[in-house]
């Protein structure tokens, strides 16, 4: 049983585009590489053929994972987001209890995470720790350097 994956409409569109590209362009490229390597003769000692077949296997595995993700994908309707607590597609302003620094993150699906844009995955340690918290609550989050405490200051739509 696969888990349901939640995406924004934009994130789902990017996922579909990535899958289409892999199926059309990348599959064709690897197929051509296999054909060229096969034309060079003895396949038992042909490193190019082995590499191309391995690349084909990796690509097919990626395609399969993307197809599974799309089959279980759901688009989140931003109008129905509950802003009483931190959840997927909410933007949360938090304060580090240790140093008082504040930062704002948008919680998104794993495939949409981009730390440069302050978009963190709901499956990341900080994302998991913040889920379900309300304004004023403190999240104790296990990170590689130990436990950090973050106070939820504000929750808005992403």
Image: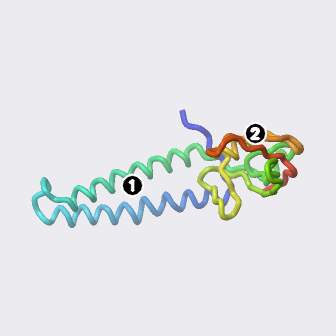
In the figure, is residue 102 to the left or right of 14? Answer: right
Local SS, label 2: strand
Residue identifier under label 2: 140
Q: Quadrant of residue 144?
A: top right
Earlier-in-chain disc, 2 versus 1 = 1
The residue at 40%/48% (across/down) is: 61
Local SS, label 1: helix
Name the quarter where the N terminus is drawn: top right
Neighbourhood count class around disc 1 (C-alpha, 10 Å): few under 14, some 14–19, many 20 upward: some
In the rendered image, is residue 2 in sight?
yes
Residue identifier under label 1: 59
In the figure, is residue 75 to the left or right of 29? Answer: right
The residue at 63%/56% (across/down) is: 112
The residue at 21%/67% (across/down) is: 36
In the rendered image, is residue 81 in sight?
no
Rendered location of residue 116, percent (x, y):
66, 64
- The one nearer the camera, 91 or 5, is 91
Q: From the viewer's perspective, is residue 120 above or below residue 41?
A: above
Neighbourhood count class around disc 2 (C-alpha, 10 Å): few under 14, some 14–19, many 20 upward: some
Rendered location of residue 14, percent (x, y):
58, 61
Residue at the far right in the pictured view: 136
Q: Which mark is residue 30?
A: none
Residue at the far left in the pictured view: 42
């Amino acid at each position: 049983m696969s888990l349901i994956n939640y995406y924004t409409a934009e994130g789902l569109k990017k996922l579909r585009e990535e899958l289409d590209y892999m199926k059309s362009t990348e599959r064709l490229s690897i197929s051509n590489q296999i054909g060229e390597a096969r034309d060079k003769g003895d396949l038992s000692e042909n490193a190019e053929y082995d590499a191309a077949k391995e690349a084909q296997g990796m690509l097919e595995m990626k395609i399969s994972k993307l197809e599974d993700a799309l089959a279980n994908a759901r688009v989140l309707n931003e109008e129905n987001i509950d802003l009483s607590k931190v959840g997927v597609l909410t933007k949360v302003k938090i304060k580090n209890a240790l140093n008082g620094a504040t930062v704002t993150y948008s919680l998104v699906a794993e495939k949409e995470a981009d730390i440069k844009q302050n978009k963190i995955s709901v499956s990341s340690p900080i994302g998991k720790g913040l889920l379900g918290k309300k304004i004023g609550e403190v999240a104790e989050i296990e990170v590689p350097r130990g436990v950090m405490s973050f106070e939820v200051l504000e929750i808005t739509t992403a």
